[in-house]
Image (cartoon, rainbow, N blue to C red):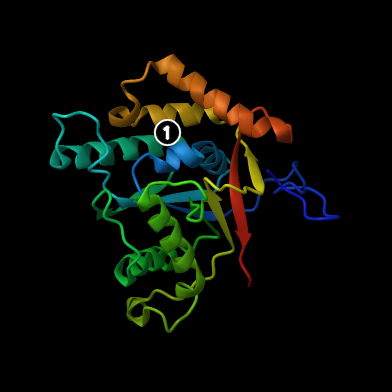
Amino acid sequence: MTRNPRPNEEVIPLNPNMDQPPEHKVILVVTAHPDDSEFSAAGTIGRWAAEGHDVYYLICTNGNKGSGDPTMTSERLAPIRAAEQEAAARVLGVKKVHFLGYPDGGLEDTAEARGKIVRFIRMIKPDIVLSTEPYRLTHQHRDHRMAGTLALDACYPYARDHLSYPEQLEDGLEPHKVGEIYLAGSDKPDTWVDISATVEKKIEALRCHESQVGRRPAEEFAEGIRQRTAEVGKPHGMAHAEAFRRIEMRR
């Protein structure tokens, strides 16, 4: 993993002593729809899980609008996409998938939605939260913006401050300080994760989302993923990579 150097700063790998196993971390991935985690970060997620970190998913919507099939209904689609997401998570080694169940296209920046994410942060106490960049210059799905905004705000200040959502204290959920945030899809990434060893796992996980990618020829789809991750990695000396904007939170 590398990041853009600031002036007079070296590029430093996440684990400088590669002979030692990386420090164990808990990671929470917060995305809008089933398949968002895989398209944006499956190589990184698979790498982290393979390194022994505990990765959890929190999917905000049920994806019940994501179909070009005119015979499909929202009622049929939601359970299909949930099953596809569970299958993809198993491929990557994710420990558990949680669904908030908001309708596709209906995720809003509300105190209720934010509180649900705060609850999960306080429950599993992640060192890292990975979500979607909400501040892209180019247009993106509204749910993606909402998921990133909710995740950022839930990390800071809400999960940290005991006076925010105090009813959660009564449930035994103590405040928690997230250490790092990784935002996928940024116009200005500063961190690149080498996924050369897990790019095929990314493709395998994406293929689990049959309702979304099933109409594309399998090898053509796989080669497109390989080409895109190769383009991301090449400037940084990596065969395949995923890019993020990384925020290191104050302690």
For the residue pair 179 and 223, the one nearer the viewer reads as: 223
Is residue 230 positioned above or below 168 on the image? above
Q: Is residue 116 left or right of residue 140?
A: left
For the residue pair 40 and 24, the one nearer the viewer reads as: 40
Question: Going 50% across and 23% down the picture, which residue do you hit?
Answer: 224
Question: Going 41% across and 80% down the picture, which residue do you hit?
Answer: 164
Question: Going 73% across and 48% down the picture, which residue do you hit?
Answer: 4
Q: Is residue 69 left or right of residue 34?
A: left
Location of the C terminus by quadrant is: bottom right
Residue 237 percent across, percent down from the top left: 74, 32
Per the image, the residue denoted by label 1 is 91
Is residue 97 positioned above or below 107 on the image? above
For the residue pair 155 and 147, the one nearer the viewer reads as: 147
What secondary structure is found at the residue carrying circle 1? helix
Q: Is residue 102 left or right of residue 221?
A: left
Is residue 228 positioned above or below 78 on the image? above
Residue 141 percent across, percent down from the top left: 38, 47
- Disc 1 marks which amino acid? Val
